[in-house]
Amino acid sequence: MQHDAELAAWIKLSLVPGLGGQSLRKLLGAFGLPPHILSAGRSALARIVSAEIAARILSDHDSAAVDAALEWAAADGHAVLTLADGDYPQPLLETADPPALLYLRGRRELLARPGLAMVGSRKRHAPRDKQRRTICRAPSAPQASPSSAASRWA
């Protein structure tokens, strides 16, 4: 797990309204790790993102949310993985817009194994519920479900 100050910087950036994954990756490319982004000046940041987002990056309005996320990550079986973590899942890194952070509850080592993500409607549908449970309980089912919804069906 990363040092709390570095992880706090990652979390803070993930909470900035309007700062999407592509812009965050541009900032990472220009400044390096999040602590360097947060120590950059507003004008330097505004060369990469809008002046409004640069101001949001430098504000301190999310400190309670950052503290709550750090407290969550410190609990047994919890972790927050960043794009810079060596065990960030490679298949996610290869997507067009990988999430900067992954909030993990469970066995971190399972992220290296094949996983199953289930995407669908937020509305429940009884016949599909049975299919999901069958897939997730099959002996050959992957041991990781990189989807919050998928874990509800196991």
Image: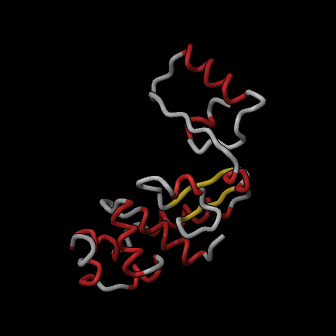
Residue sitting at 60 percent across and 68 percent down?
Answer: 85
Residue sitting at 24 percent across and 83 percent down?
Answer: 43
Residue sitting at 62 percent across and 73 percent down?
Answer: 2
Residue 109 sits in quarter = bottom right
Residue 32 in percent (x, y) is at 45, 80
* Figure quadrant of the C terminus: top right
Residue 89 in percent (x, y) is at 60, 56
Residue 81 in percent (x, y) is at 59, 62
User: What number of labels is visible?
Assistant: 0
In the image, residue 116 sits, relative to residue 130, either above or below, namely below
In the image, residue 140 sits, relative to residue 127, either above or below, namely below
In the image, residue 39 sits, relative to residue 92, either above or below, namely below
Q: As drawn, which residue projects farthest toward the right? A: 139
Q: As drawn, which residue projects farthest toward the left? A: 51
Apparent side of residue 154 relative to residue 39 in the rendered image (left or right): right
Residue 146 in percent (x, y) is at 59, 45
In the image, residue 115 sits, relative to residue 27, either above or below, namely above
* Figure quadrant of the N terminus: bottom right
Q: Work out whether residue 153 or residue 94 is closer to the camera in this orientation and state it.
A: 94
